[in-house]
Image (cartoon, rainbow, N blue to C red):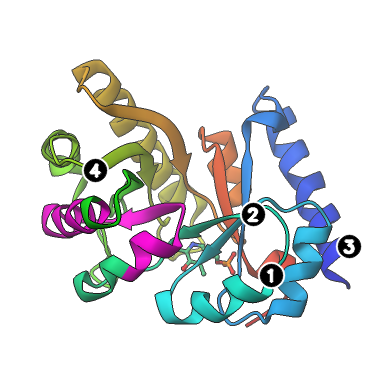
């Protein structure tokens, strides 16, 4: 299957999930995740209408960014080390994977140096799995509050990775947790914070994610094939 055909299939599945959830597909931003994928195939996705690309590593993204044509936004979705923050801030339109106050401070500092406010999302570890990054749900509202006070950082939403399991109820619980946290943040009325994006759902779980309120799905395998 070509990238274009895969994309059509993914879009169809997004539409069906939206139908079930009585939502409009227009609400959903599809992020094509390009880790390990070369520029030619990324270009196919962009030519087929993809507007947002997600990369996990600063270095890997660098070569691709200069090779891919078209007006696309690049989102950093992988764990970001503080010593790469400067580069990430220069390269990416959004850093979805801000998972600590320390990292957020570094991102803000680097944003100040390069003279722009950095759009970020706060990553929450909703599954509690030790292998995953992100702060615990219990501290998330507090973390958002603290990050909101950092100059040159603008919070646009929350991001999570669902539990690695076949049990859909467990995965859904992660998504519900993130959605609830976004509501808690809204209710707290923290200045300088927008809960515009709820970034959750990957190849294996984007349909339940949409049913649970996701408006940003990050999909690699279903678009580009197995890695
Ligand atoms: C790799 C990755 C994805 C996409 O995963 P697929 O299962 O290939 O769709 C989404 N989000 C993050 C953070 C990732 O690292």
Which of disc 3 and disc 1 is earlier in sequence?
A: 3
* Distance from mark 1 CB to nearest ligand 1 atom below 8 Å: no
Q: Is residue 99 above or below residue 190?
A: below
CB atoms at circles 2 and 1 under 8 Å apart?
A: yes
* Distance from mark 4 CB to nearest ligand 1 atom below 8 Å: no
Left or right: where does residue 74 sit relative to residue 220?
left
Q: Could you say where residue 179 lies in the image, as x and y percent from the top left?
A: 39, 33
Q: In the rendered image, which residue does mark 4 sit on?
A: 152
Decide whether residue 106 is among the magenta residues. yes
> Can residue 107 be seen here?
yes
Residue 5: which numbered mark, if any?
A: 3
Magenta residues, as a range? 87-111
Quadrant (top left/top right/bottom left/bottom right) for the C terminus: bottom right
Distance Cα–Cα, label 4 vs label 3: 40 Å
Distance Cα–Cα, label 2 vs label 4: 23 Å
Image quadrant assignment for residue 9: bottom right
Distance Cα–Cα, label 2 vs label 3: 20 Å
């Amino acid at each position: 299957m070509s990238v274009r055909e895969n994309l059509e299939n993914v879009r169809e599945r997004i539409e069906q999930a939206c139908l079930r959830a009585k939502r409009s597909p227009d609400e959903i931003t599809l992020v094509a995740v390009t880790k390990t994928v070369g520029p030619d195939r990324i270009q196919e996705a962009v030519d087929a209408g993809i507007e947002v690309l997600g990369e996990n590593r600063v270095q890997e993204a660098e070569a691709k960014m200069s090779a891919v044509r078209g007006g696309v936004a690049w989102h950093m979705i992988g764990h970001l080390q503080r010593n790469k923050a400067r580069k990430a801030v220069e390269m990416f339109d959004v850093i979805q994977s801000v998972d600590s106050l320390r990292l957020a401070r570094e991102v803000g500092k680097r944003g100040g140096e390069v003279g722009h406010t950095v759009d970020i999302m706060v990553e929450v570890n909703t599954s509690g799995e030790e292998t995953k990054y992100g702060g615990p749900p219990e501290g998330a509202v507090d973390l958002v509050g603290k990050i909101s006070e950092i100059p040159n950082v603008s919070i646009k939403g929350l991001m999570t990775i669902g539990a690695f399991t076949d049990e859909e109820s467990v995965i859904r619980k992660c998504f519900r947790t993130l959605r609830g946290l976004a509501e808690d943040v809204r209710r707290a009325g923290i200045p300088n914070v927008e809960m515009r994006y709820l970034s959750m759902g990957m190849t294996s779980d984007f349909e339940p994610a949409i049913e649970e309120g996701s408006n940003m799905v990050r999909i690699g395998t279903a678009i580009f094939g197995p890695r």
